[in-house]
Amino acid sequence: PASKALGSATANSTVRLILVALQFLTRVPVRMQAFKPAWLNDCVRHFPLVGVLVGAVGALVLIVAAQFWPAWVAAVLALSSTIALTGGFHEDGLADTFDALGGVVAREKALAIMKDSRLGSYGALALGLSLMLRAALLAELAMRPTALAVSALLASHAFARAAAVGVMVSLPYGGDVDHAKAKPLALAVPPRNFLIALAWCGLLFGTLAVWAQPLGPLLLSLVAAAAVAALMRQWLMRRLGGYTG
């Protein structure tokens, strides 16, 4: 029947976009027989799902390592596992962002700094402080109930990636479109992709709400992700006139 064929095509398309998102955000080897630039634009809707995978790996390492070593060792190992899985993708972006926007420079200069592969003082400081803060928080989680630690890691990695999609949807591309590293993402990201990303977050929130109590930390993580996204959007709009990457 036509409805069955349509459902199968939709399922295949969803799996394909999830694999593209996994390939883009992680070092997981994903082989695809074909590729279309539009898939990279649409795969952002599944960024939170990839975040769940990254968070799950970090949670597993944290829980297992905490059985054998002190909390801070478990925290560093968990943090290292997520960085290894993503290839330092987000850390590289964080350093580039603060190198470019940390100082008082013109828009064109800031964009040029972002393309510079060298690490500057602002980027080094932001990266170092970020790693220390994350390690400290993970060490604290290692001493908390397992359900809370797992929930925090899954939620933070998923909600943060959904926040990034929200920024892309709500801002124009601020760099040189023709020379963008991921050119499909320099085009307009449809709002429906953000809605689907939010749906993934809603599914995760509902699952964790049933499995892990209380709801307070989950709600706080949602508010934190939204607040950071709003601040980042305002900062990027003021300094660059849009997002870049």
Image (cartoon, rainbow, N blue to C red):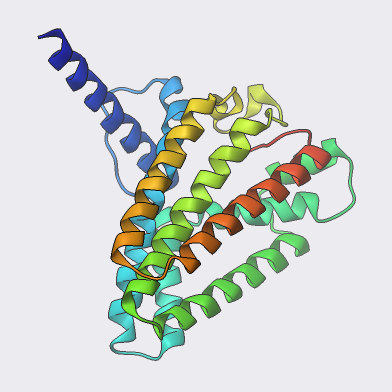
All told, the count of numbered labels is: 0
Which residue reaches farthest top? 2
The answer to which image quadrant residue 128 occupies is: bottom right
Above or below 116: residue 84: below
Determine the residue positioned at 17% across, 13% down.
3
Say if residue 20 shows up in the picture: yes
Residue 86 screen position, x and y as percent: 43, 54
The answer to which image quadrant residue 23 occupies is: top left
Which residue reaches farthest left? 1
Residue 138 screen position, x and y as percent: 47, 76
Determine the residue positioned at 72% across, 68% down.
125
Above or below 189: residue 163: below
Determine the residue positioned at 29% across, 24% down.
13
- The one nearer the camera, 126 or 49, is 49
Residue 233 screen position, x and y as percent: 70, 42
- The one nearer the camera, 204 or 35, is 204
